[in-house]
Amino acid sequence: MKWFRRQEKHDEAEELEAIEVGAAARVAEEAIDEAAEVEPDQLEEAEVESEEVFEEEDQETVSWFARLKKGLTKSRENIVGKISTLLTMHGKIDEELWDEMEAILIQADLGIHSTTRVIDSVRESVERERISDVEQVMGLLKKELTRILKTEAPQTLDHTSERRIYLIVGVNGTGKTTTIAKLARSFAKEKQSVLLGAADTFRAAAVEQLDIWAKRMGVDIVKHERGADPAAVVYDAIHAASARRIDVLLIDTAGRLHTYVNLMEELKKIKRIAEREKGDADLQTLLVIDATTGQNGIAQARLFHEALEVDGIVLTKLDGTAKGGIILAIHDELAIPIRYIGVGEGMDDLKDFSADEFIEALIGS
Amino acid sequence: MFDNLSTKLQDIFGKLKSRGKLSEKDVDAAMREVRLALLEADVNYKVVKDFVSKVKERAIGGEVLDSLTPGQQVVKIVNEGLTELMGSTESKLSFAPRPPSIIMLVGLQGSGKTTTSAKLAYHLRSSGKRPFLVGADVYRPAAIDQLRTLAEENNISFYSDDPSTAPMTIVKDGIRAANQKGSDVIIVDTAGRLHIDDDMMLELEQIKKEVKPHQILLVVDAMTGQDAVNVAQSFRDRLDFDGVVMTKLDGDARGGAALSIKAVTGRPIKLVSVGEKMDSLEPFHPDRMASRILGMGDILTLIEKAQANIDEKQAREMEDKLRRADFTFEDFLDQMEQMQKMGPINQLIKMIPGMNKLPKDIAVSDQDLARIRAIIQSMTREERLTPNIINGSRRERIAKGSGTDTHQINQLLKQFAQTKKMLKQLGSMQGKGRMPKGSFPFMG
């Protein structure tokens, strides 16, 4: 498909080869989800019926894991590749080596706190085990990075009800509306009934944006006029979902910087209303974070979590050149589970987060 | 913004300043902290390395260590270095000698191009231009509607077409429409794209080639991490953009990307977006920003804001009152309202020298001000003029009237008394400039 071809052009040949081999093996072994690539512009060109979109999947043979791995190759090079080069070039274990290692991890957006923790731990092992061989440092580092993601690996959230409500929140421009569209599609594919609640009543045309997605996905939407009270939209959407016995209600909210006290209060109110009105449905709050975000991602996660008790994080835009680091930092500092990751622009590029696969893709074997 | 970096640097240099003599070791230790602080602020690693070694070199030079105030000298060098990193002077938008000028906005998804396009049009109109908006983002659903809505709400001329139209066609038709209207600046909003997306970057290259924009501005989210320079470099290589607009600077992003992009791409930051409202696009002043990072305040911006929003006669009256120290709750309310016209209180406070050192928990929010206003408005005129008559039963009445409790009334009365005392002191030490820490009026 288009997106995939486009990506290929940028990757260096050898990199590609290695991944393709790995991917092929994995496809054979695990036959992970296969995905259709639907470009927004393609959808734009032809009013594609949702059923037709779903049928395209069978033609696609590349596993999402391969794409994740491919997407992360650059960050793998950032962390492991760079450190490997550093170790070879430097050749000895000294202060400078630790300083440089620290810089590499920070550059991968791991943040000073997590970086210090990783380095201290590796250093401790080196000193305790009296390691003088630089080669062994690499192994210790991999072990430590794995430990962070593993020990605090996200648990799949238990649903207490068949009916679910997802409240999607985040700062401006992280991809909340697109994420909702992708989630709607994935639930619809599982033959679940989906309703969208357009509670971003602030941004111009945000309702229209969600409305277009609703039409493309063939799902219903509850919307008010722009400028309406978002809590009122939430109220109506929950009652509509309940009356129609909808399986999944996805609520879009306006992007807001976590530092605006009044806007965060507005979100708290929205959540209170949702808690009060949800009935037998299971309510989950998902925070959408852009993977290109630097250390501010931690502040976002922290403040949204403090205000709303976030149940999970959706990490979007992992198909750029910056990725990986912020996941570790957020895990390390807040231990909020990562539920979904966005690995591409296609509609099926939102995936359940799996720590194992992520580490495999990030660190390599 | 830049809060943590600023606090960190101040801590470090506070230590340096308190010593009369500095050794090379002192400078080394401080620079290590500077390095970590900058890295933590998302300043690009290579930029940090370069910066630190340059500053160190200058700081260890004989003239600094032997000077009477070595700590301050180091701060000065760091300050100058930061300013230089961000571009030494304010870099203005440039326009075509013969209108119309075409400005094209490009960037990653979610960086804020559409909102910035509308804000830019608004900004240009305030400076006497006749802007025209062209919506060429045909990919994101309703992106064109978004720009159209913003244009209509703010009475700005606008052109776009159905999303099935090629962006190139929309841009060309838009320019034609703008010319017919006699507009002198045409702002083109393009779709967000990944810098490594070859097809999409090619699309921009073609538009550039065809319509020859006078300015291409890269819109960058201030919260971007280490990747900001990679993005900026890719966009420079393909489009050779002219400058950067930094968005979402109103949050708590430490904004290291701002420091890095100029250094790495050589392209200046021209504008910054500091709020959700249409008028929140401001020129970028590297020197002021550097002062702000170092906690030296941004008094110039504050003065400009004050000049634009405060009635001079009222200000003079206020000054008289302050001198005579007959400052009442009426004045308190008055002054509060004047200040609120200047923008969110938190942002204003940060511009005052020494004020960004305040601990986080005593930050003043606009909500606090609203509460204070409610309390004062629940007082009788007599009470406002002579607060000492406010006894227990009056307190209870005021609390009821303002929806607060007597504890909060007491707190405000205490604050008021302190403020009055402080103003008296200020009045007697006129001209010294620097306000004592924590003594800003209305500070909780």
Image (cartoon, helix red, strand yellow):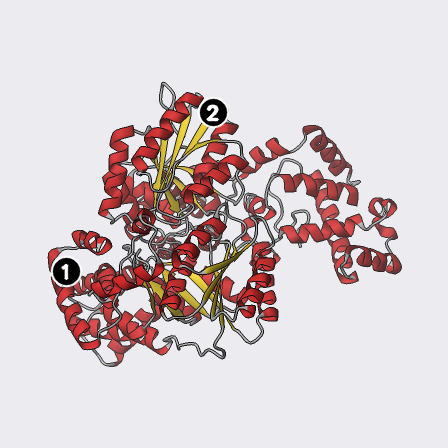
Chain bearing mark 2:
B
User: How far across and how far down the image is residue A24, in percent?
Assistant: 15, 69
Is B72 on the left or on the right of A86, as rendered? right
User: Which image quarter holds the N terminus of chain A?
Assistant: bottom left
Q: Nearer the viewer, residue B13 or A177?
A: A177
Identify the residue under disc 1. A15
The image shows residue B22, relative to residue A52, as above or below, that is: above
Identify the residue under disc 2. B129
| Dot 1 and dot 2 within a common chain | no
Extreme residue toward the top, this view = B98
Total number of numbered labels?
Answer: 2
Q: What's the distance in space between the residues labelled 1 and 2, CA to CA?
A: 51 Å
Q: Label 2 amino acid?
A: Lys
Q: Residue at x 68, y 29 (%)?
A: B312
Q: Quadrant of residue B62?
A: top left
Q: Nearer the viewer, residue B82 or A351?
A: A351
Q: Label 1 amino acid?
A: Glu
- Asked if the residue under mark 2 is in contact with the one under mark 1, i.e. CB atoms within 8 Å, the reply is no
User: How far across and how far down the image is residue A354, in percent?
Assistant: 32, 73
User: How far across and how far down the image is residue A29, in percent?
Assistant: 18, 77
The image shows residue A211, relative to residue B247, as above or below, that is: below
Residue A257 visible to an observer of this rendering: yes
Q: Quadrant of residue A108?
A: bottom left
User: Which image quarter holds the C terminus of chain A?
Assistant: bottom left
Secondary structure beneath disc 2?
loop
